[in-house]
Structure formats: C-alpha cells, structure tokens
Image: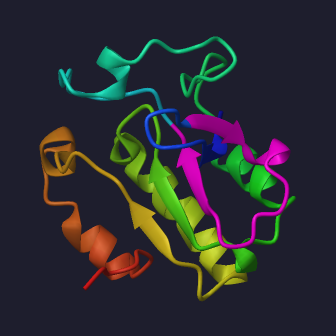
Amino acid sequence: MVLYTVTGKVGEEGYLDIAESGDLTGKNIYVNMTNQCPCSCVFCLRQTKKQQENNTLWLKDGEPSIEEVLELFSKYDLSVINELVFCGFGEPLERLEDVCAVIDSLKNTYPNLKVRLNTIGLANLIYGRDVTPELEADSTLYQYP
C-alpha cells in the first residue's frame, strides 16, 4: 500500500488503502514510498508484527515512481485531510529527493497542506552529508511547536 489510513482500536490497528476509506475529512493520510531501511530495530513493526497478506505495508511490486505517487494523489481532495505523513515500512528519507519532489508538487496545489515526516533520523549518515538544509530550505514540512 502506498497511500493509507490507520483504522481500528488501539492494539487492533490495521492499514486501510485510502481508496477504501471513504470520506477523508479530518483523517491523516500516510505515504509509504519505500521498503528500504538501514536499521533492524527490535521494536520495529518490520520485526515484530505478523503481517496479514492483505494488510501489509510491504511494497511487493517495488517502489512507486514520483509520477505514480502523484497519480494516486490526483484522485483525492487533500484540502480536507488533517495531515499528510511520510512513513510506512521503510525509512522515507532513503528517497529524499523523491519525497521532496512529491511534497513540493502537492504543496503547489495545496499550499496549506500539513506534512509530517516520520524518520529514524539517519539521513545524514545514509547520504554521507548534512541533508537538513535541503529539508529546511524546502520549507515543506510542518514544524511542530
């Protein structure tokens, strides 16, 4: 699943493709663009939760292109959602340029879109350089107080 919401009670959460989630008003939409992660954390969902075949975030058909992600978003009115969250089954910043390109494109259409990035915080190590100026200069991410 590339675009999804979380459904169910605490402890019984499941992932629901936004195509099946009905009205998106007030919901958080999660974006899963990669399976890649440089870590193997014992507490991570990748290590601890048995994934049902029809309820998994693993991208079985490979990672979607920027164009494929934007095509999925084109079907929805994002002005009604609470926030857009880049996370999923891999580390989003493994695809730093692609994530920024998707955010930039969506922000052109929805300038007030709140965007959150859930990260393990190792992008500087992954790329061997300080990537924070790229994220800061991009001004695409919502700054939580």
Can residue 83 be found in the magenta stretch? Answer: no
Give the magenta-colored segment's residue range. Answer: 14-33
Within the image, what quadrant is residue 118 found in? Answer: bottom left
Q: Using residue 14 as the reference point, say whether residue 73 is left or right of it.
A: right
Image quadrant where one finds the C terminus: bottom left
At x 20% / y 39%, what residue is drawn? 126
Colour scheme employed for the rendering of this structure: rainbow
Q: Residue at x 42, y 66 (%)?
A: 116
Quadrant for residue 19, please give it: top right
Residue 73 on image: x %, y %: 76, 58
Residue sitting at x 54%, y 41%: 32
In this view, the residue in front, 85 or 131, is: 85
Q: Tell me the quarter of the image containing the N terminus.
A: top right
The residue under the point 60% across, 22% down is: 62
Q: How many marks?
A: 0
Residue 59: x percent and y percent?
58, 24
Please tell me whether residue 21 belongs to the stretch shown in magenta. yes
**Considering only vertical position in the picture, is 115 above or below 131?**
below
Residue 3, percent across and down? 66, 46
The residue lying toward the viewer, choosing from 135 and 129, is: 135
Above or below residue 57? Residue 81 is below
Judging depth in this view, the residue of 65 and 38 nearest the camera is 38
Residue 105 appears left or right of 88: right
Decide if residue 110 is on the left or right side of residue 74. left
